[in-house]
Image (cartoon, rainbow, N blue to C red):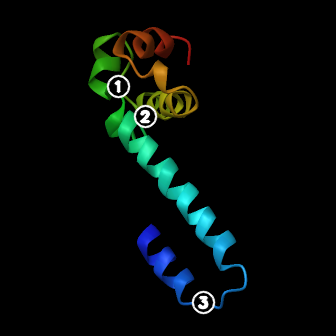
């Protein structure tokens, strides 16, 4: 998508082209950093699963999904929290 944005920007008039190109570069740099750091952006990338929560004592049901969503929000804010130990301990309080 970033390549398409860059190509589209290159085809536009010179007015604001450099500023737009700089924004595209910043987005590309941020994207590369996320990939490099392997930050969790989806439930699948969390270090725990619903099975882990159930094994830790949570009852199966919609609360498992809600807890995983809350954990993902926490991990997006603080990627260092994406450890099984932290998330299972934190899961008891969410």
- Dots 1 and 3: beta carbons under 8 Å? no
Residue appearing at x 44%, y 30% in the figure: 68
Residue appearing at x 71%, y 79% in the figure: 16
Q: Residue furthest right?
A: 15
Q: Nearer the viewer, residue 60 or 3?
A: 3
Mark 1 vs 2, N-terminal side = 1
Which one is closest to the eye, mark 1 or mark 3? 3
Instruction: State the separation of the CA atoms marked 1 and 2.
Output: 9 Å
Does residue 1 appear anywhere in the picture?
A: no
Q: Position of residue 63 (x, y in %)?
A: 47, 29
Left or right, residue 44 beside residue 34 = left
Q: Which residue is mark 1?
A: 60
Does residue 14 appear anywhere in the picture?
A: yes
Mark 2 vs 3, N-terminal side = 3
Instruction: State the separation of the CA atoms marked 1 and 3.
Output: 54 Å
Q: How many marks?
A: 3
Left or right, residue 78 beside residue 62 = right
Q: Mark on residue 12?
A: 3
Q: Which residue is mark 2?
A: 65
Which one is closest to the eye, mark 2 or mark 3? 3
- Dots 2 and 3: beta carbons under 8 Å? no
Q: Position of residue 37 (x, y in %)?
A: 40, 34
Q: Secondary structure at mark 3?
A: loop
Q: Secondary structure at mark 2?
A: helix
Residue appearing at x 53%, y 83% in the figure: 10
Q: Secondary structure at mark 1?
A: loop
Density class for disc 1 (Cα within 10 Å; few <14, some 14-19, many ≥20) is few
Left or right, residue 20 beside residue 38 = right
Residue appearing at x 49%, y 51% in the figure: 29
């Amino acid at each position: 998508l970033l390549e398409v944005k860059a190509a589209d920007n290159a085809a536009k008039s010179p007015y604001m082209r450099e500023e737009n190109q700089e924004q595209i570069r910043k987005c590309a740099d941020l994207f590369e950093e996320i990939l490099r750091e392997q930050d969790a952006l989806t439930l699948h990338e969390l270090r725990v699963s619903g099975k882990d929560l159930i094994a830790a004592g949570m009852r199966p049901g919609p609360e498992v999904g809600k807890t995983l969503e809350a954990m993902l929000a926490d991990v997006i804010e603080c990627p260092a929290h994406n450890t099984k130990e932290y998330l299972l301990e934190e899961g008891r309080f969410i």
